Amino acid sequence: MNEEVTVEVVTDLARPEDVLPNILHLLPLEKKPFFPGQVLPIILDAKRWGKTLKAIQKSGHRVVGVAFTDGIRPELVEAKDFRKMGTVCKIHQMEQHDDQYHVVLAGMQRFKIKKWVSKKRPFTAQVSYLPELSPKPTTELKAYTTAIVNIIKELLPLNPLYGEELKMYLNYFGTGDPSRLADFGASLTTANAVEMQEILEAVELLPRMEKALVLLQKEIEVATAQTEIRQHIEGEITQHQRELFLREQLKFIQKELGISKDDRESEIDTLLDKLEGCVIPEHAQKRMDEELDKMSVLERGSPEYTVTRNYLDWLTSVPWGRNSADSLDLERAALLLDKDHEGLKDVKERILEFIGVGKMKGEISGSIMLLVGPPGVGKTSLGRSVANALGRKFYRFSLGGMRDEAEIKGHRRTYIGAMPGKFIQALRECETANPVIMLDEIDKMGMSFQGDPGSALLEVLDPEQNKDFLDHYLDVRVDLSKVLFICTANQLDTVPSPLLDRMETIRLSGYLAAEKVSIARKHLFSRQLKRAGLKQRGQLRIDTAAIRRIADEYAREAGVRKLEKLLGTIARKTVMKVLKGDELPIHVKPEGLEEYLGKPIFSDDDRITGVGVVTGLAWTAMGGQPWI
């Protein structure tokens, strides 16, 4: 098993690497390959690899083969996991510490596995060696050698570790050995293990040097980027330290001159800066001055200081007298309403009348609108369109299920976690004193032992009273008369009559079939295509007649929510067809709707005529549906 093969060399004396056994013990390399001319320290588990190392010692040849195993852990390695090309190494040092062997290997030359002798530990194989013969000097070889040396020179300033490895290499070799130089250049890089293995398997010198140049060039780019990032971060840290030092110097100078401001004064200045552009009423200014005086004498760590500071934060966040300019262009308002909503002619005319009156007066104030209609007819979006037409900020909150009047009027400051009501929060968020505030689902307010929000709204929605709206948290009267309130409801039965008297009711009865088709074409269909990730023209087409049939036989409600859901169903089923590879575009026709939506829900019954038969119309309270 220990037969030896002699490699023909040009010298008379045989070097150790010239006489190598043709049967070689193998060790796995998990992370990356190992090149000839390198020194590799490895740690091996004595339990798994002790027999291999002892077998090497008994053989009399202190050499071992190492081969890359594609990241497979050593304890799981099998013979099939070893790459065919590896490096034969001389064992320079081997020491046992407890249950581990510390081994230092020196790469000698490449080998190739010809046939396995033992596919179990200790792994042994019959190999053939690929010694490096002295190449003939050519112009191309010299050019590659110079290129590798120049790139290594470029790498040296970017990472000091490269310099240490270069010194070790020059101690044993030199730039006159192109083969070792190519291997050394590749080993300097952080290339992945597969690319390193390709270098190891490149026996021909010029292709190997070319691949090494590619890896070195990539390493130059990576190292340059890392250096730039490091310099940028160091520059930012240096600038931050400089600013911190200058800031401390400035504080010291201000303190010496008696002009320094402490944190309390800085907070007061920040609060006062928020009032820029505001016209503060006299009563609010008086309260603000009192609280600022109190804040200036309180200790910053006391609970009362925090309460006072939070109160002033809210008080200065109210946009006192800061109004946005209204856009009273009737033509623009009409275009916006027509763009966003189909039909609803009476409602649009009433809104335009409202804007026209405001244009005649020079301001819009003192009106509260209530939009009443079935779900899905566009009440909420109509309020947003009014805000866009006027050029005002829009704020919406729902009153559905609200049971606590503090949501409207705010909490007393004596309570922990006290906050102002929704209207003060709306003014703070909109940063103007004349936004459009939408009160959604006003017919679904609740009532409990905590209070009655409907009664709390009486002051807000009364144009004669909301000039002096009093929030319990602020305890300062705020003018809400410039705010345009738009409320929505599905029915009027549950709206308190005193509240109903303060609003102007505008009814939205619903859409005709033709209007539904137009809405689906202009708005709903494109929205559902976008949600499903489909392209409007390239993947799904739907006939107008098909949309009309959906409106007639599947979605007869007043609004368009059901219609939009059904269009979404068609879009989702189309997605499944696209993923299955059906021919595009998928065309939906009226007669093919049952494939997507099932049997129609509604159908036209034959009219029954004759003596004793009467046709009538009744409106029931059960869902608000007509019965014929």
Image (cartoon, rainbow, N blue to C red):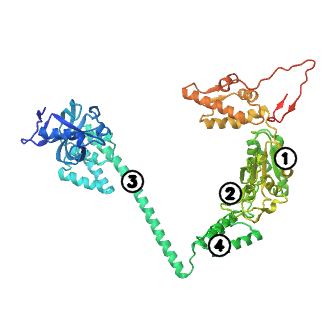
Q: Name the residue under label 3.
A: 226
SS class of the residue under badge 3?
Answer: helix
Q: Is residue 512 left or right of residue 293?
A: right
Q: Distance between the residues labelled 4 and 2?
A: 25 Å
Measured from the top left, where is residue 551 in percent x and y? 74, 30
Question: Where does label 2 land, which residue?
Answer: 429
Task: Mark 4 vs mark 1: give the one in front.
Answer: 4
Confirm whether residue 165 shows in the render: yes
Report if residue 135 is visible in the image.
no
Q: Are marks 3 and 4 in contact (CB under 8 Å)?
A: no
The answer to which of marks 3 and 4 sits earlier in the sequence is 3
Residue shown at the point (76%, 68%) measured from the top left: 281
Q: Which residue is at the front of the view, 282 or 611?
A: 611
Upstream in the sequence, badge 3 or badge 1? 3
The amino acid type found where label 4 is placed reads: Met
Q: Where is 539 relative to 348, above or below?
A: above
- Kind of residue indicated by mark 1: Thr
What is the spatial separation of the Cα atoms under label 3 and label 4, in whole angstroms? 51 Å
Badge 3: residue crowd in 10 Å (few <14, some 14–19, many ≥20): some
Closer to the camera: disc 3 or disc 2? 2
Q: Which of 569 and 587 is in front in this view?
A: 569
Q: Label 4 vs label 1: CA separation?
A: 47 Å
Name the residue that disc number 4 marks: 295
Residue 102, disc: none
Looking at the picture, which amino acid does disc 3 mark?
Gln
